[in-house]
């Protein structure tokens, strides 16, 4: 990136966007730094001793894979901006160049921290627990014999070493692949030749070794084995030095959608392109020699600032696989037993259950099964005429996809709106699309220029009294796997008003009709932004006229500058605003005269906080909305999103309670400070509460009771069932860690 | 699949000038309507037709794609009944027939091209079926104005009856096309528009003096937008009226705004922005002819009319009877306009109905055919206004040109054919009027002709001599029994002359038996003298 760039002629530069927020740059937090802060909160989980060891391992891996994606998309986009001569500052006032510099500095600091945890805390702890990561130089005889054989029979056949000389150009190194760079020479007087070999991604990164010691099991990293036998690759050459490296490439997908006649083809093409985007980050082991680095840096055209020198194994994403190594279950979270609420427990049809009243599910504490069951029942029910669903990220072997295929087989009208552009999931999505089309489903690939992010299922059923519509609306994707890891909310309803608007919404997506006027559903990009403005303004007006006014919301990210400006105005008017933002937050809270009435909490924990809840006081109406949209510009402008009101009082109360619990969490909450950093909540004088654990233990408890009751009921011994049930009384909701002061200290660190 | 016994799902499609619209509704046992889908998809039919005179091939393709999408939705609801109609754009397209055929071929959807009157009739039907206080308004007096792309339709109701209905070539698209050359030349285009509209409506000024109309109803696809903009509300449907004050205020607001600014300021599509001012000028003009303080905008569309029509026909609702009465009233007004002997017309109508009802088991005709019979009976003689000699032919032409409101082209053709053959010739000749009808319709027409002829015969002398008419049916014979105070030789003779045609059509031999009630006072003034020249002419005509 050091070579001279020819900037675009002035006329071709993108126009300066005037954001007209009316607030100074300094009141906004830079989005990229905000994101790095979020990822740091993930990293913090790796030294929280309340997390079992293997979970900490997993968080290390998540930190790395998050960062990879961040580089491929966000950093890449900044690089693109610089290349295109676009140097408009962000709402916080930083130019793309400045942002890149800040990112590099901060990311390097965080990675340093990551490896310090790995080396000083995690690896020793693993050892204590019988998981030994062995250095290639310290293998015993038996282990050496094992790796020698393993290299010969398993690794060697899949290695493709490549040397670089005048006739062979620098090979294309795959994005995110781990490689070993080396300098070799045939004779002493030759100038060294550069060679590289990819550490095969088809083989497990970590290999178990025989271990006769009494200290548990032993493992070695794949690249360590290869390094041991490098001389086998270039038999007549001398290896002068070798070291692992890894590159990250620009992978931001930018389609010229207006020109694309077939979106599917366009994405398939772009997938191939992604592998060979420009290199934007080079990771090397700290021990790499200057000579080797020089060759790499020149060949990859990478800047000084883009080199990440790392003390430890590169690419920790493999720890996700290590996490699944059998035999260490005791070092992980107890698997959660999602609660199947009582109403779903007998054999009643979902249609009956939903007809009675609106139903609500809070995943992962509540089971996702009813959602899958609804689609399955719809597929089998002879009275169901049509099923329509939006699918964004589907699980590998999705029972929902299977049911949709079956429904089409049975002659039902099945319409699936599949979003191909779900980032990094395109390849699997294309497969599902083809499969569904073959089954006779009407598959639509979204609107050009807009990602379909809304989560909605509509079932049309012919009943005794005529047509009836059933609906599921959610904050999360129809993915039965992530439903166990993400917190999300979902609503079942057979409310006719919602149903008919859902139909209209699908007609808009399928292109049968122009967007209609809707009253119950609010749709982005049509009017969601305006609607949020209206709600925020309403609170501000109430506050100004001396009435009570508050806004409480949970979302993944808060980025949109115009929404932030509206929130500032509301805060200035006196509206109390409490936000739960798990990820990026560009709003700067607590600034006197601007945002002193705003608090921002972030809960990062075992489950990914994914729900989007918006609660407005509205002069006592206490309106609660759920949505698929965050307060991000892309959600409000470039995606098809839905917002719906919760009208059922019981459900509304429950959601308000959930919000209360999340906002009173003390053990996992970090509070955004005026300076953009996050601090652990000051727990003094507060009841200790771990919201996620509270919810999951409650679900667990109820499920246990149910199983016991069921079993005892089957034994027709109700009396003892009752006594056992009573003895299993719910645990107190507050979870206190044994050594709280010490942990608190470590966390604050 | 479970089929709901109580509910019927039907779909109504309207191929309009700007867009294709579809409603899928569920109709309950009691005629209640639930809208399942309401769709609208823009299509450039009107643009093609109003500028090229025909619909382009690519547009046909585009329309078929949309219709195929609509059809998929119909299947999703198990909709079995589909009513598809086309309005002014297709009506005026030179390639209308190929177009309709191509659509049927590609989509399986049969499209009926509505005439102007029937289009208006369906819209009003939608109002009757959907507006709760329409009765009150129709009684107190209401002006209905629909601003279409080609025409403006004005109708006046008072005391529950239709006062007049008028079609003026002043639609907003037409206005823009006519005046487009001026738009660039004149700075004061809006004023010019106003003047142009005034010049075309001056003959309606008398309405203001002659009638006092308290209600004004505005119809047409632009009304939703106009309502939203005038009321300054985001969500339509909150209010279905616009206070005249707000209307005028907004009128002033946009009067001098060029179209691009309208698009930007109000987020309108180019089409809507272009038609906004012309539509408002027209509405302002007409609203000024009434005493109304607000514009009622019921957001009803042709599709609602199709649905209402379906329900009325299926459930024979009260509204349906009201429509029959309206149409009959129109026919009578028309007959009166042509100085018809209404006593005779009513008598023929009555006798025809008696025959029709008596033959219910044998004629196989429907309720709608009964209405056609009535209409033909009422108007059969109106051609005499033009020419006594070939009055039946004139009647036929007058009926065809009358624009009877609410009848389809097919129905008008049947009524016209019946009036044409009500007196003399047998309808076997090759005749344009009959050729345009399907075989089935020709049979219906023949049956109606036979009935009108027989009924006409019963009042040959135009003096309503026969009273208390009863019908007897016995195997192959139909006996008309009646009483009379005077001599009915003429009637009986004409009746006999017509029996052959009747027998051919129905397979029944008609006889007449008149019981003479002798009344001394009137003995001297019986018959003969009162037989008009026309009656004699007609009577002798039967022989030929």
Image (spheres, coloured by chain):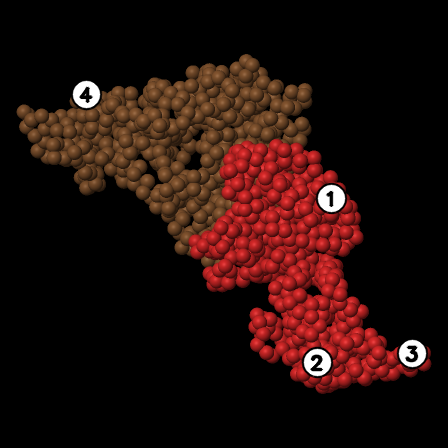
Chain colours: A brown, B red
The residue at which mark 1 appears reads as: B290
Q: Chain of mark 2?
A: B
Give x and y (percent) for residue B179.
54, 44
Disc 3 crowd, CA 10 A, few/some/many (<14, 14-19, 20+): few
Q: Quadrant of the C terminus of chain A?
A: top left
Residue, x 40% and y 51% (percent of image)?
A: A435
The residue at which mark 3 appears reads as: B522
Which picture quadrant has residue A155?
top left
The residue at which mark 4 appears reads as: A290
Give x and y (percent) for residue A323.
37, 34
Report whether residue A203 is seen: yes
Give x and y (percent) for residue A514.
53, 45
Residue, x 35% and y 43% (percent of image)?
A: A266
> Are discs 1 and 2 located on one and the same chain?
yes
Residue, x 54% and y 16% (percent of image)?
A: A594
Which residue is nearer to you in this view: A307 or A363? Answer: A307
Q: Closer to the camera: disc 1 or disc 4?
A: 1
> SS class of the residue under badge 3?
loop
Distance from the alpha carbon under mark 3 to that under mark 4:
137 Å
The residue at which mark 2 appears reads as: B541
Q: Closer to the camera: disc 3 or disc 1?
A: 3
Q: Are marks 3 and 1 in contact (CB under 8 Å)?
A: no
Distance from the alpha carbon under mark 1 to that under mark 2:
51 Å
* Numbered mark located on residue B299 in the image: none
Report whether residue A714 is seen: no
């Amino acid at each position: 990136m050091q070579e001279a760039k020819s900037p675009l002629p002035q006329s071709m530069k993108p126009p300066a966007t005037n954001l007209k927020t009316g607030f100074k740059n300094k009141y906004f937090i830079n989005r990229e730094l905000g994101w790095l802060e979020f990822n740091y909160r993930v990293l913090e989980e790796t030294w929280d001793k309340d997390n079992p060891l293997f979970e900490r391992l997993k968080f290390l891996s998540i930190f790395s894979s998050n960062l990879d994606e961040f580089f491929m998309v966000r950093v890449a986009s900044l690089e693109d901006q610089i290349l295109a001569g676009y140097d408009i500052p962000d709402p916080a006032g930083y130019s793309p160049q400045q942002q890149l510099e800040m990112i590099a500095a901060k990311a390097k600091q965080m990675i340093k921290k990551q490896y310090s945890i790995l080396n000083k805390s995690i690896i020793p702890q693993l050892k204590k627990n019988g998981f030994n990561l062995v250095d290639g130089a310290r293998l015993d005889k038996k282990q050496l014999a094992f790796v020698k054989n393993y290299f010969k029979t398993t690794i060697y056949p899949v290695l493709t070493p490549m040397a670089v000389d005048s006739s062979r150009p620098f090979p294309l190194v795959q994005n995110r692949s781990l490689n070993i760079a080396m300098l070799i020479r045939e004779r002493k007087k030759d100038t060294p030749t550069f060679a590289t070999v990819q550490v095969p991604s088809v083989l497990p990164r970590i290999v178990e070794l025989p271990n006769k010691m009494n200290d548990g099991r032993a493992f070695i990293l794949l690249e360590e084995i290869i390094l041991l036998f490098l001389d086998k690759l270039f038999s007549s050459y001398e290896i002068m030095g070798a070291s692992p490296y890894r590159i990250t490439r620009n992978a931001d997908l930018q389609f010229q959608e207006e020109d694309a006649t077939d979106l599917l083809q366009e994405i398939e093409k772009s997938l191939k392109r992604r592998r060979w985007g420009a290199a934007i980050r080079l990771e090397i082991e700290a021990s790499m020699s200057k000579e080797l680095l020089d060759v790499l840096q020149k060949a990859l055209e990478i800047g000084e600032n883009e080199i990440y020198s790392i003390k430890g194994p590169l690419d920790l994403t493999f720890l996700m696989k290590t996490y699944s190594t059998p035999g260490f279950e005791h070092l992980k979270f107890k698997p959660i037993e999602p609660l199947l609420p009582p109403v779903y427990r007998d054999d009643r049809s979902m249609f009956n259950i939903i007809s009675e009243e609106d139903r609500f599910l809070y995943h992962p504490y509540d089971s996702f099964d009813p959602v899958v069951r609804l689609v399955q029942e719809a597929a089998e029910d002879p009275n169901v005429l049509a099923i329509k669903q939006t699918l964004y990220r589907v699980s590998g072997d999705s029972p929902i996809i299977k049911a949709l295929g079956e429904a089409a087989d049975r002659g039902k009208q099945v319409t699936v709106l599949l979003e191909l552009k779900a980032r990094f999931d395109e390849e699997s999505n294309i497969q599902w699309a083809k499969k569904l089309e073959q089954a006779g489903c009407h598959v639509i690939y979204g609107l050009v220029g807009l990602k379909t992010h809304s989560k909605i299922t509509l079932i049309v059923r012919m009943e005794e009294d005529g047509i009836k519509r059933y609906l599921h609306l959610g904050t999360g994707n129809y993915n039965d796997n992530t439903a166990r890891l993400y917190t999300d909310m979902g609503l079942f309803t057979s409310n006719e008003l919602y149903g008919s608007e859902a139909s209209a919404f699908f007609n808009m997506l399928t292109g049968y009709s122009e967007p209609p006027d809707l009253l119950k559903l609010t749709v982005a990009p049509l009017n969601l932004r305006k609607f949020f403005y209206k709600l925020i303004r309403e609170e501000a007006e109430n506050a100004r006229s001396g009435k009570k006014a508050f806004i409480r919301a949970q979302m993944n990210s808060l980025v949109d500058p115009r929404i932030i400006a509206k929130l500032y105005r509301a805060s200035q008017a006196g509206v109390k605003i409490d936000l739960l933002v798990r990820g990026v937050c560009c709003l700067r809270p607590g600034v006197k005269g601007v945002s002193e009435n705003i608090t921002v909490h972030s809960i990062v924990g075992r489950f990914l906080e994914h729900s989007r809840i918006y609660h407005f006081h509205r002069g006592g109406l206490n309106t609660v909305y759920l949505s698929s949209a965050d307060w991000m510009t892309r959600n409000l402008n470039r995606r098809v999103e839905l917002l719906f009101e919760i009208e059922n009082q019981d459900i509304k109360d429950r959601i308000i309670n959930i919000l209360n619990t999340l906002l009173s969490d003390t053990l996992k909450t970090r509070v955004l400070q005026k300076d953009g950093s996050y601090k652990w909540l000051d727990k003094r004088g507060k009841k200790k509460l771990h919201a996620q654990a509270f919810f999951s233990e409650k679900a667990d408890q109820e499920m246990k009771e149910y199983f016991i009751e069921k079993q005892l009921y089957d034994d027709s011994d109700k009396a003892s069932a009752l006594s056992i049930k009573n003895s299993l009384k719910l645990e107190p909701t507050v979870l206190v860690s044994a050594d709280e002061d010490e942990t608190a200290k470590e966390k604050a660190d | 699949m479970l089929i709901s016994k109580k509910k019927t799902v039907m779909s109504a499609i309207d191929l309009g000038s700007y867009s294709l619209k579809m409603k899928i509704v569920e109709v309950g046992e009691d005629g209640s309507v639930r809208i399942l889908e309401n769709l609208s998809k823009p299509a450039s039919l009107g643009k093609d037709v109003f500028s090229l005179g025909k619909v382009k091939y690519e547009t046909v393709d585009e329309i078929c794609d949309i219709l195929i999408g609509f059809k998929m939705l119909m299947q999703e609801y198990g909709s079995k009944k589909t009513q598809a109609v086309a309005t002014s754009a297709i009506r005026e397209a030179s390639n209308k027939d190929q177009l309709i055929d191509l659509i049927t071929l590609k989509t399986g959807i049969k499209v009926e091209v509505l005439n102007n009157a029937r289009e208006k009739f369906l819209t009003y039907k939608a109002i009757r079926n959907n507006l709760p206080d329409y009765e009150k308004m129709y009684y107190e007096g209401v002006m209905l104005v629909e601003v279409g792309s080609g025409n403006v339709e004005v109708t006046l109701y008072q005391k529950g009856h239709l006062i007049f209905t008028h079609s003026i070539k002043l639609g907003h698209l037409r206005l823009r096309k006519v005046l487009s050359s001026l738009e660039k030349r004149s700075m004061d285009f809006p004023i010019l528009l106003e003047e142009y509209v005034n010049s075309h409506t001056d003959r309606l000024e008398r309405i203001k003096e002659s009638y006092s109309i308290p209600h004004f109803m505005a119809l047409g696809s632009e009304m939703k937008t106009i309502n939203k903009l005038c009321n300054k509300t985001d969500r339509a449907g909150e209010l279905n009226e616009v206070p005249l004050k707000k209307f005028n205020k907004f009128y002033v607001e946009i009067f001098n705004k060029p179209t691009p600014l309208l698009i930007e300021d109000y987020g309108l599509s180019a089409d809507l922005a272009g038609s906004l001012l012309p539509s408002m000028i027209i509405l302002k003009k007409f609203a000024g002819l009434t005493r109304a303080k607000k514009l009622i905008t019921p957001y009803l569309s042709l599709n609602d009319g199709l649905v209402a029509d379906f329900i009325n026909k299926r459930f024979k609702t009260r509204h349906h009877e009201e429509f029959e009465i309206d149409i009959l009233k129109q026919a009578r007004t028309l007959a009166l306009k042509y100085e018809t002997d209404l006593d005779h017309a009513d008598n023929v109508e009555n006798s025809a109905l008696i025959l029709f009802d008596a033959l219910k088991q044998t004629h196989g005709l429907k309720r709608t055919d009964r209405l056609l019979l009535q209409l033909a009976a009422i108007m059969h003689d109106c051609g005499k206004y033009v020419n006594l000699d070939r009055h039946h032919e004139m009647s036929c032409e007058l009926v065809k040109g009358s624009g009877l409101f609410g009848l389809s082209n097919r129905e008008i053709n049947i009524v016209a054919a019946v009036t044409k053959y009500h007196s003399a010739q047998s309808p076997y000749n090759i005749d344009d009027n009959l050729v345009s009808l399907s075989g089935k319709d020709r049979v219906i027409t023949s049956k109606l002709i036979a009935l009108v002829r027989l009924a006409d015969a019963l009042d040959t002398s135009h003096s309503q001599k026969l009273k208390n008419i009863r019908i007897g049916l016995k195997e192959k014979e139909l006996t008309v029994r009646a009483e009379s105070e005077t001599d009915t030789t003429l009637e009986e003779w004409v009746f006999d002359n017509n029996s052959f045609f009747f027998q051919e059509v129905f397979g029944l031999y008609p006889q007449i038996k008149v019981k003479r009630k002798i009344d001394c006072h009137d003995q001297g003034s019986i018959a003969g003298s009162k037989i008009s020249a026309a009656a004699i002419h007609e009577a002798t005509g039967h022989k030929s």
